[in-house]
Amino acid sequence: MPDSPRTEDQETPEDEVVDEAEETEATSDDAEESDADLTEAPEEQDAEEDSDLVAIPEISELDDNSPLREMVEYVARALTSNPDAVSVSEEDDGNRTVFHLSVDEKDKGKVIGRDGRVAQSIRSLLRVAATKQGTRITLEID
């Protein structure tokens, strides 16, 4: 097969190798510059983060059931279309605490769910959180 004449627009394999080498040099120079930027950035970020820190109270600093009550209320408000009507009251019943969740009549179906699946999920979350605190809690939906 005779070689066809080469035009300037066509590249040969040797040209491709040279182009790749130039690109590799350019990207390694960019990487060195970005590495220098990364070494300076964390020091600046640490100083900024320290000034923005907010003290979060430990669970033991709050009353025993307050975080759990807030959790139930938060989940119920997220599920309902009228979150202002959501209220959670607690009643100490000897060895356990009973949370009474009341919602708007129109939202009861959303909180209970099909076959009680949503309510059971809320109870499961509550049970896990209460177990971590060493308490027993039940949830009743009014």
Image (cartoon, rainbow, N blue to C red):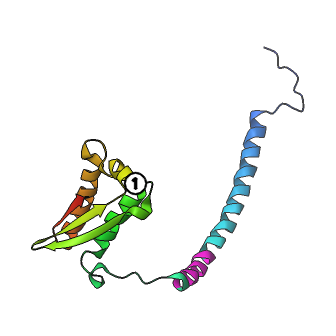
Q: Secondary structure at mark 1?
A: helix
Amino acid at circle 1 = Leu
Where in the figure is residue 3, as x and y percent of width and height?
82, 20
| Circle 1 crowding by C-alpha within 10 Å: few under 14, some 14–19, many from 20 | some
Residue at (25, 64) in percent of width and height? 100
Q: Quadrant of residue 78?
A: bottom left
Residue at (37, 56) in percent of width and height? 104
Count of numbered labels shown in the rendering: 1
The residue at the far left in this view is: 94
Part of the protein shown in magenta: 40-50
Where in the figure is residue 38, as x and y percent of width and height?
61, 71
Residue at (40, 54) in percent of width and height? 79
The residue at the far front in this view is: 105
- Locate residue 11 relative to residue 125 in the image: left or right: right
Where in the figure is residue 28, as x and y percent of width and height?
68, 59
Q: Which residue is mark 1?
A: 79
Measured along the vertical axis of the image, is residue 35 above or below residue 27?
below
**Image quadrant occupied by the C terminus:** bottom left
